[in-house]
Amino acid sequence: MEKREIFGSRLTVIFAMAGSAIGLGNIWRFPFIVGEHGGAAFVLIYILATLLISLPVFIAEVTVGRRSRTSSYGAMSSLAPGKGLWKFAGVLSIAIPLIIDSYYSVIGGWSLDFLLKSCAMEFVKTDPGNVTSIFGSFITSTWSPIIMHLVFLAACAFIVANGVKAGIEKFSKFTIPVLFVLIVLMIVYSVSLPGATEGVRYLLKPDFSEINARSFAYAVGQSFYSLSLGMGAIITYGSYVKKEENIVATSAGTAVSDLMFAILAGLAIMPAVFAAGIEPGAGPGLIFQSVPFVFSSMSASHPAIGAAVSIIFFLTIVVAAMTSCISLLEVGVSFLKDRYGVNRKKGCIMLFLLCGAAGVLCSLSFGPLKDITLWGMNIFDIFDWLSSNILLLVMAFLTVVFVGFVLKKEDVWDEITNSGTKKVNARMFDVIYFLIKWVAPVAIVIIFITNFIF
Ligand code: PHE
């Protein structure tokens, strides 16, 4: 059998994992959730949730991946053979990324289209009053969003087809540092606008009166999504981590990069939105309507700067979404390869066809298929809700229960500390193990219930 590919160094593991983590979740979801839930007070809760719950779950996923050295489908069942539940977890870990990829690449396609529009200086040339309608008419049309979705997905599949090292690792090694530079440039522009301080205050002023049980659930749910947990992606990437690598250090490095990027994205977007005097709306409207409005209204005197910043902004989104989409495709490719011996290139073509077709339905659900709904949600919303609010939590729950109760504690110790050779001392290991075994499962059950009851 072909030897399993592995990532080159600690830094490249972190870049690849951060590539998966940093995405649309950081750029549009994080800023407005923070605003709606008490600004800096929520950021504090989010940091705590990331360190106490998501980071242990992340470590658990990397542990399962590296110990099994197989795709997320077979990871748990190979470590605990004969148990149906872990086979089910394997199936979930393949189904979730396929569902997410289908709608995620549609948003990727929108971003790509807006990047092209930025290059054509469309937002700068359009009257601010009309710029917000560009998004609505684009997504409700039939062909353009479908074509963009397929182009975006094909580009991601092409990178995955080149392999773990020559494709994923090489791409993220180059793009992750670039993303940080781009977002900082955007912040410089954003905070220099007149009236921007209001936006900074919106993000950084703690308002504890807005904090309630739901805020905690939101914080944990958002940080799971943002760190790509509960979807097989980190288990799969974990299976490519070298035996000598320190799991705790790579996981913590990824979590910190993701956290930093989310905060930077908030600082890039909110001041600009406030400077333009518009309400920070939730959902995709924030980046596809409010931000173009900013470019249009702020750049009357300097159209070239406005155009350049809008290119920077949408390029950031396209690249961030690509590295996430790549990790979702890799889950499927690694499954097809390990389970059925399908080679990487064929696997990429199969996944492109599958997610491409499902994505077409998601894309059409804003236009010709908008009347197909369930509980008021269109196909796109159903894909998002089912995967991000339900299945992801089930999968994350199964993973921590698996590491806490099925794997032997000595084996978890052996994997996390590399048989005691890494700088993870016994006390630190005990804390991590306790968080995985007790805190994370209880927290996940509570969020699940909160999502339904409140
Ligand atoms: N973590 C990504 C984001 O923040 C989303 C994602 C989910 C990526 C699942 C990979 C797997 O946008």
Image (tube, helix red, strand yellow):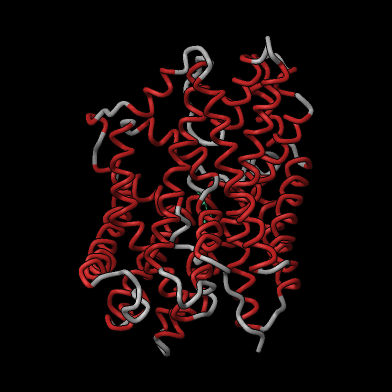
Q: Residue at x 68, y 20 (%)?
A: 305
* Nearer to us in this view, 48 or 148: 48
Q: Residue at x 22, y 72 (%)?
A: 426
Give the side of residue 108 with respect to residue 414, left or right. Answer: right
Give the side of residue 359 with respect to residue 11, left or right. Answer: right
Q: Residue at x 49, y 36 (%)?
A: 265
Residue 377 to residue 397: above or below:
above
Q: Residue at x 79, y 42 (%)?
A: 143
The single residue placed furthest to the top in the displayed view is 301
* Nearer to us in this view, 108 or 450: 108
Which quarter shows the C terminus? top left
Which quarter shows the N terminus? bottom right
Residue 7 locus on image (x, y percent): 57, 69
* Nearer to us in this view, 389 or 128: 128
Residue 92 locus on image (x, y percent): 49, 69
* Nearer to us in this view, 170 or 336: 170
Residue 346 locus on image (x, y percent): 75, 73
Would you identify the image quadrant in which residue 285 lies? top right
The answer to whether residue 88 is seen in the rendering is no
